[in-house]
Image (cartoon, grey):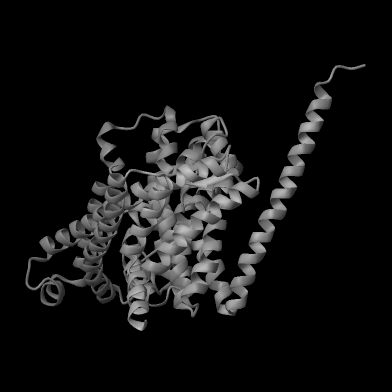
Amino acid sequence: MNSVLDSLLDVFREPSVIIGLIALLGLLLQRKSLSDTVKGTIKAFVGFLVLAAGAGVVSDALTPFGDMFQHAFGVQGVVPNNEAIVGKVLTDYGSQAALIFFFGMVVNVLLARLTVFKFIYMSGHVALYLAAMIAVILIANGFSTWQAILWGSLAQGLITTLSPALVQPWMRKVTKNDNVALGHTGNFGIATSGLVAKFFGDSSKSTEDLKIPKGLGFLRDTTVVIAGSMGVIYLLVTLVAGPGYVERELSNGQWYVLWAIMQAGKFAAGVFIILAGVRVVLAEIIPAFKGISEKLVPNARPALDVPIVFTFAPNAVLVGFLASFVGGLIGMGILVAVGGTIIIPGIVAHFMTGAASGVIGNATGGRRGAVLGAMANGLLITFLPLLVLPFLGDVGLQNSTFSDADFGVSGLLIGGAERIGHIAVIALVLIALAATFVASTLVARRGATDEVTTEKETQPAG
């Protein structure tokens, strides 16, 4: 009997198997053919192993970078990159993260069904990253596995339901309708950009009136931007650390310039591999989830990844990316002046969330709104990752961390509550759940009142 239980525990400790089982469940619920079910299950299983392999490549590139940065500046240098940190997290906490991800999706569907916040979070990759962060914070701070899965799933479902609602007023300005929502872990920063643009922008001048040189088109290719920017960063830190130190301690005698370029290339390759693995996994899970949610939650809005807004203002994409990156550099300068851990601007985060912030900012406050809104996002995703580091346990020492604003806000709330005690985390989740239903009731009543008022105003006199 014990051997059977041990075998079952081994199965549920292996995240790649958990992912395969979740995909299998989704395919069975869709009543797919035997061929499609077998193929989808195996692809999800293998996709996770691809993700883990990419994590190893990224880790191999970041470890010497951390040593070199510390030698050069005497402080820890951290690169916020979701793929890099998640790869490490899923190696250690993959089973718990996978279950929080799955049950968090269920909670999202239930909340969308029972409240006025009818947003179905379809950006599975960042939802998985969010589940990974929640798993780390809870388990690293003493929660048992079942407790982490229970309270983590509720927290995940709340965040993925309310985060799109936060941005929806600004999305309506961009899309000119209310049919689609934004589902991304950068939503808090993107909503902040809309707020900044509203108060400090000037909607009379749009970014789309600008003439952007075609030669800068390569900045829209994420892999190229990651490899190029990390190459510059590696080379600069290598020069400060000293070619002698690098060739003696890190490169095994290889020419320091070539070594720096190769490490940057390995980092970009690792991120590319992780993204490929994530795409394969989610390609099997998300369609099943979407089909089920559409039956359970009619009239729900899909909350989709940030590229859905890029086509509405292509120039704002580039303006927002550059302004957010400048905000990151300003934030890094402040941290250098203050001393301590340095957050190095994460190119992927500034590109994705900065671009979306630029589009939202432009729709709300024109060119000035795009620049100032995206810069505000850049500052947020510099300081928030730093504040979350202490709650990540040993994972916070990996020279990388979670990058987007939603990670920072939710991580601070959950981690801060955890410092008070387990009961504070449970209270936080339950209070947030109750507040969601209260807010839903108030919004529904207000909507009903508005409808009655409109009907009275449109009725003919007499």
Q: Farthest front residue?
A: 1
Residue 79 x, y percent position in the rendering: 34, 63
Residue 274 x, y percent position in the rendering: 28, 56
Residue at 45% across / 48% down in the picture?
A: 289
- Residue 288 vs 3, above or below: the answer is above
Is residue 108 at least partly visible in the picture?
A: yes
From the image, which quarter does the C terminus lie in? Answer: top right
From the image, which quarter does the N terminus lie in? Answer: bottom left
Residue at 59% across / 72% down in the picture?
A: 425
Q: Quadrant of residue 239?
A: bottom left
Total tally of numbered discs in the picture: 0
Is residue 397 at least partly visible in the picture?
A: no
- Residue 56 vs 277, above or below: the answer is below
302 displayed left or right of 251: right
Q: Farthest bottom residue?
A: 2
234 displayed left or right of 170: left
258 displayed left or right of 132: left
Residue 66 x, y percent position in the rendering: 27, 71
Residue 146 x, y percent position in the rendering: 49, 73
Residue at 50% across / 36% down in the picture?
A: 362
The one nearer the camera, 457 or 76, is 457
Q: Quadrant of residue 67?
A: bottom left
Q: Farthest right residue?
A: 462
The one nearer the camera, 55 or 143, is 143
The one nearer the camera, 341 or 164, is 164
